[in-house]
Image (cartoon, rainbow, N blue to C red):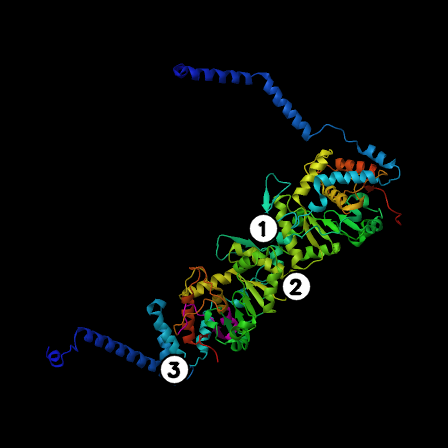
Amino acid sequence: MGYSERSGKDILGNRSLFFIFISAFAIVTLLQHILNGKNYIKRYFELTEGSYDYNSSTCRELRNDITEVKVLSMVKQSELFERWRTLQLCKWELNKTEANTARLTNCCNAIQNFTVTQVNTALGANLTYDAQPKKQITITEDIFNLLPQEMPYSRSQFKKCAVVGNGGILKKSECGKEINSADFVFSCNLPPLSNEYARDVGHRTQLVTANPSIIKKRFQKLDKWRRPFVELLQVYENTSVVMPAFYNTRNTDVSLRVRYALDDFSAPQDLFYFHPRYLENVARFWGRQGVRAKRPSSGLMLVTAAMELCQEVHLYGFWGFPMDPSGIHITHHYYDNVKPRPGFHSMPNEIFTFLHMHSRGVLQVHTTPCR
Amino acid sequence: MNRDSALPPRSVFCFTTMWSIWKCYRSRLPVGAALCVFVLCWLYVFPVYRIPDQKEIVNDVLHQPVWRRNQTATTAFRRLLENCCETKRMFAVTQHNSPMGKNLWFDGEFLHSLSVNNEMFAMFPQDTPFQIPLKKCSVVGNGGILKRSACGDKIDKADFVMRCNLPPLSNEYARDVGHRTQLVTANPSIIKKRYQNLMWSRKAFVESMKVYGRSYIYMPGFSMKAGTEPSFRTYYTLSDVNANQTIIFANPDFLRNVQKFWKGKGVHAKRLSTGLFLVSVALGLCEEVTLYGFWPFSTDLEERTISHHYYDNVMPDTSYHAMPEEFLQLWLLHKSGILKIHVGKCGQIPM
């Protein structure tokens, strides 16, 4: 009242007050952002990746931050990401005892049971389908002759293995060199390895899974042309292709036909079929770890096998969330953005388990770009 | 009855007419007519004319004067065939005669058709792939009469050699059946039987096709429902390995017309044999046609028993083809100088 009388203007009238409040609020928010941002920036500058030792107390705490999250739904996803991001500050080291116990509790005996071979499956034996326990297939002479003699791998044969998933996180990761430097590379579902991706995913693989659904969709079950399929496989040189032929009845014919197609063109690739018992055991093993899904993904199969065949397991391209740890949206695969049918796999659960294993030092999950 | 009496007079009249028609039906006339139709149908299906038996035919063959081409008869017959079937344009399915969206009515099925789609259209050749007219053609049947005939050289001398049903051409037979092939028919049932429908391994098939060199494989892919799939798969298989052989599909319209044509001449069978189809194609495409290995009897001219095929002795289902009738027709053509059937031996075989 008094002011307005003195100056003749209503400086602190309703409208001005309103404006002042808004500006103050904006300034405070801005400051907050700047401060926080500074925090981030500070953290980023001071603590680059791998700057802490594995055994330092900070790192132990950070690892504990992850392992104390027992179930994925216990924390917010952003919180988990934050913790995971800070854990990147620590160097990763293989924890031999943990790795060994993980290997001991490992169920599945990949050395003998990984695939169906002439050694572990007799002529005339009955195999029970994994997905259809009531159905069996008899190994007739025709099928028996298609089977490989024996799995050519032995326990802890390879020093460093890379298991390469197809997650969009691999895009622009430049991890190709690191992946290529591994002794043995596993990859999933016939991924494209052409030159445009070689920088990010490497150009070689020794063992690749192939899903019959791909062959059904893209190659008409090999009923028509077969050359395109065999030509596609040429990228993989002489890798071993592994197919879940005895997962369910629908897969069998297509998978067996792949063997014939490879023979038709004298292709150098070896073909193996997952043993249904192995699939079952793996599913049960991971179920105990908290991964419950209709069917375990082929990535999970490979990780399980890699844990037995290799001393050190590195995972690339395994990230089952729609955004990367810093919250930026990523494509579903590094080569496309085709989402799978929902309800089959529970990727976040699988990844979460891998993060746990990473913290325990059993395997290393790579989610940041490689330098 | 009670209800009838309640009806108005018009309805009563109606009722009586119906009754009288019903009564008429009970007379013998319609029954006789039905019987008559039945007998006519019967005669149509199983005609009661007499096929000369084997001895007569053998006698006829033995006492045949030297064969000479009859140009006028040939021209006349060819015109007849051209009028019915248009062999040159129609014998295979081409992009020309079967444009996209055309319905191909299967000739061996009752009312079944397939419309030409993009994928099928790409399989067809643009137009009839031969240099027409062809000059000298040999049509080689698979009859046991070819065994130890030494006709190989003579067959190979022709410009164009046609064979039936993917016959074996290995070295042991080359002396009798030759080794050149320009056109060979392949029955989808063979693909199904010998190569498991090409569902599994295809190598064996591709290897076995190498015998036929750079030839056309003539498949009746649009005759039976069950034959389409194997024929397409054969196409895919051969195109996969860039084989020398080219698949052409028999045009169902052509096959139907040819069947009608020969039916009019008195060949009554469920289906003509591949041999007769091939002879019809040859008569349409070539100037001079010679047949080898066409002899549907179990003994040769000297009354020695011969096998059914030159390579095996597997008897076919007898009710399906009417081989003797077909042979008779061909023999008539031979006698009138339109084509030449080679029955005897072509040379001496060292024992």
Amino acid on which disc 2 is placed: Ser
Q: Secondary structure at mark 3?
A: helix
Q: Secondary structure at mark 1?
A: loop
Which tag is nearer the camera, tag 3 or tag 1? 1
Which tag is nearer the camera, tag 3 or tag 2? 3
Is A153 situated left or right of B279 in this image? left
Mark number displayed over residue A44? 3
Q: Could you give the CA–CA distance between mark 3 and mark 2, rounded to whole angstroms?
A: 54 Å
Residue in the image at 74% along x and 51% along y: B130
Residue in the image at 77% along x and 31% along y: B51
Amino acid on which disc 3 is placed: Tyr
Closest to the observer, A260 or B96: B96
Closest to the observer, A264 or B75: B75
Earlier residue among tags 3 and 2: 3
Amino acid on which disc 1 is placed: Asn
Q: Is residue A69 visible?
A: no
